Amino acid sequence: MGKASTVTFISLVAAIIIFPMFISLFPDGIHISTPDDIFYDGDALQFYGACEGNGSAELRAYESNVTINNETRYMENLIISGDISFACQEAVLDSDRLFTSYVVIQGDDCQVTGNGINVTEIDGYISGNISIRFSGTVMLHESQVENRGIPFIADDFSRIFPARFDGIFFITNGSMKINGKNIDFSHHVFFRGEGLWRGGTRFEGTSHLTAVDGKFYDEEKKIFFIPVRVVILWVVAIALFIGSLYVKKNTFRERDEIFVGFSYVAAALSFAISFFLWHAELQRILGLNLFDMGNMSMGNVLFLSLAIVPYLVAIGIIGFPMSVAVSSLFSMVGLSNLGKGIGRSAGLLMTTFWGISLLSSILNVTFSPLLRLL
């Protein structure tokens, strides 16, 4: 076995060991993205997802199966008011009112209006047509059930936008701060996230991806529409590439021949790690699982294709120039094969780390037209 074959074999064995070891150490990725802090004052917040609340509330149930204190019955109408705690696996919130089909409820010193029920302490659950008007605190977060038929989201948008429609917030007026900065908006704010809704007038929470008036919220400095750091990366890459055309030394050219196979193995390993990390971040930010092949259809294939577009764009604007810059440096000393492997690896890993931090900028280029459907 020649030296080149030996290096290739060792590289391949190392890659086979490193990738599963990396996944076992970081099964959920490494949390590259940083959520935005959201503060909202107003009464125009709408939400779909799961919730738990407590405080003063009035629950109304119509044509429902009611189980209270281990007694089950069907009731046409039921009203429960007082200080209660409740939890909904999935619900729609409109300002200070929740609508759901199932709720677990507990309460002391409650007032109950309904045939055959004469209790003040309540512990049970209700399934049916339920609304809850509250003035306490409600924790809003993702449920386990996606709903692309959310009443306050346009159908044309929910059908094609590549995100899991769960933990969805929609705001049409009021005052808002994102990361401590006052945000002026004239139409709407849309985001996926979680947080506390207090008294039906104040929200404090987090969001991984926020759209304001048809654009994704983005604090990145830009030259025209291109992030400054991407421009700098391209300038450096072009300068190094031009320099490598004129500065070439053959100091390590003979040794470089043994790294031909290594360059391909390193690139393949880096691509696998890069895409795994990107997918983990995509799950956190958009709620997408690209490896969930259940109920596959042509619509789902198109949907997943749209979800991959930002990664391909990130490779083009970040990974490619990074690869060129690194490989140009190595080629100056006669290590072009080794440089290609390390350059591709650096480019693919930079694609994920910079790409996720610049995701809002990338989505403004690729998906902002879809926000006009909201």
Image: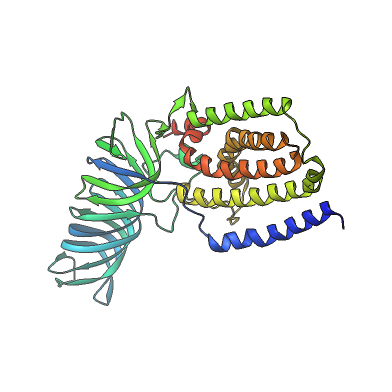
Identify the residue at the far right of this view. 1
26 w.r.t. 148: above or below: below
Residue 49 shows in this picture: yes
| Viewer-side residue, 315 vs 336 | 336
Q: Quadrant of residue 56?
A: bottom left
- Percent from the top left, x then y, of residue 131? 26, 55
For the point 73% across and 46% down, the residue is 263
Question: Which residue is at a point 62% across and 43% down the rendered structure image?
Answer: 346
Is the residue 305 above or below the residue 115 in the image?
Answer: above
On the picture, is 115 further left or further right than 310? left
- Apparent side of residue 102 relative to residue 247 in the rendered image (left or right): left
Q: Residue at x 73, y 51 (%)?
A: 265
Judged from this view, the residue extending furthest toward the bottom is 70
**Quarter holding the C terminus?**
top left
Residue at 51% over, 30% down: 365
Judging depth in this view, the residue of 353 and 203 nearest the camera is 353
Q: Quick check: 174 above or below 67?
A: above
Q: Position of residue 283 (x, y in %)?
A: 49, 51
Residue 270 or residue 182, whichever sits in front: 270
Q: Is residue 66 visible?
A: no
Toward the viewer: 32 or 229? 229
User: Where residue 345 appears, x then y in whole percent?
Assistant: 65, 45
Q: In the image, is 22 to the left or to the right of 122?
A: right
**Which residue lies most toward the front here?**
251
